[in-house]
Amino acid sequence: MGFWKYICSFQKPIHLLRVRKMKSNETIISRKKPFKANKLWPFFFAAPFLIAYFIFSLFPTLYSFYLSLYDWNGFSPKVFIGLKNYIDLLTIDPLFYKSLSTTVVIMFLSIPFQIIIGLLLANYVYSLRKLQHFVSTVLFIPYIIAPVVVGVIFAYLFDWHNGYINDILLKVGLLKTGVYWLQTPVLVTYLIATMGIWRQAGYCMVIYLAGITSIPVEIYEAAKIDGAKAIQTFFYITIPQLKNISMFLVLTSIIGGLQLFEMPVMLYSSAGGMAAAIVGGPNNAALTIIWKFYDNTFKTGFRLGYGAAMSYLLFVVIVIFTILSFKISTAKKENN
Amino acid sequence: MKNKLYHLILNLIVLCFIIITVFPFFVVLVMGTYTNDNLTRVVPYWFSDYFMGNLRSVLRSNFLQSYFNSVFVSFTSVGVCLLFSAMIGYGVSKFEFKGKKLITAFIVMTMMVPQQITVVGYVIEMRMLHMNNSLLPIIVCWFATPFAAFFMIQFIREAVPSEIIESARVDGANELHIFFAIVRPFIMPGIATIGILTLEQLYAATPHCEQIQSHDLAGFHQQPDIRVQG
């Protein structure tokens, strides 16, 4: 039986099987050899990744949790305080909820726009006959730029004294005096959302473009024969066909949006034309949760345990958002 | 007529988008040709003549060292990451063994864990291993990238025909030989894709790593001399 299984597993034509049957037992055994050796090979291939993951990711993750139960500044002896770090964060620290809500608000301001703009641009670029590559490349450039650089560029653009946006608006005559873009809490929120849209829209476009290209042309042709207009095909064919890609984009944008860090930081860094680095911007309006985490853990606070607790709470938030968006998407599918 | 107008408006809107996209880059280029003092006085819209001067001061500020560091870090970390991901991809997708489902589920789970959660523990771990104040910590943390591994598992399952691997086995090829001579050419497109994605992720996250580096607790009092251009 084992012999037949062995032969069949190679899916050889019948006449070859006969030849093999007649061969001596020895050759069969010698051919079985690589099969026996197989049992350790998969572990050999999986080992480097798993070992690296255990050492450089899993251990630090668990160690972070261990540290989150302590009050420790990195130098003095650790003091075990149980869940006090978590309780402090959730009840006493006013900036935790503020930074969390700032991050979520920025996320909800930017994600719908970047996805809708990306979809519309992808649809437009796909319909282009000339310059398709040129337009898509130009629109994709912002995504290649590191978020740090984006922050610095926007700090220059929106500076009050010699920023381009104020200058242009003044010259055109839309404004009488310059607007304090970076010093007004409400405007800062919109500004950071704009940065997000500016950077991510091209990325969404490229992903959507890949999706649109893979939609079968026959569907469009059938719609055309049935007399559908461009807008109808867009709403009834393109969007439903791209559902999975939209889902992917929403999920990754949410996870990335909750980890927003460099762009707001660089808006208020001394490199960005500002006089001095300020943590959190005006009235902490730009303080995202990761910024608060870095500030408390490594810059001003040196509260390692506190920071570790914060990172775990962020993880919980990310998981909640992921589950929510999954639930929403599957609920829609059931309705359909 | 109506159709033409519609297309004109559409093109104009997209042109606006392109201008908005390109304008900041143009501004950066223009600003690069001015002296610092001039920049605080005027808002420049066209090129000046100080570009070479700025370039000189950039090169004097140890820029090439940072540049080399960036390139070195990205290539070593992404290279090893790709090798490890391809290996686990081959191991998990083309073999039948106990624990296969467990490993796949484990990788999917780890994709959800944000990087920040490891940071605090990672800094302390690197201090314990005496790897602080070097480039190693920001290279090593990319060796096991769950997304790359997940992608490679999916990709190898689809892209590499099992028959070819099996026939190589029948011919007595070593598994390592199969991996490098037969599987590797098949997965080059996937390697390229995931290499670009990981590189982009790494570049976006390098400042995080610098944060780890420069505020590393043990080396906090001495100025770290290794800089990475993000």
Image (tube, coloured by chain):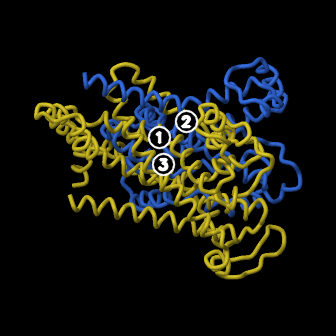
Chain colours: A yellow, B blue
Tell whether label 2 touches label 1 (CB within 8 Å): yes
Front one among A326 and B15? B15
Q: Amino acid at mark 1?
A: Ala
Disc 3 secondary structure class = helix
Quarter of the view holding residue A271: top right
- Say left or right for B104 vs A188: left
User: Which residue in the protein does label 3 denote?
Assistant: B149
Q: Is residue A211 left or right of residue B216?
A: left
Circle 2 or circle 3, nearest the eye: 2
Using the numbered discs, state the Cα–Cα distance from disc 1 to disc 2 in whole angstroms: 9 Å
Q: Residue at x 52, y 68 (%)?
A: A316
Residue ranking furthest to the right: B222
Q: Label 2 lies in what chain?
A: A
Q: Which residue is mark 2?
A: A142
Counting from the top left corner in percent of width and height, residue A21 is at 20, 42
Q: Pointer 1: what residue?
A: A201
Point out which mark residue B177 bears: none
Chain of the residue under the numbered disc 3 shown in the image:
B
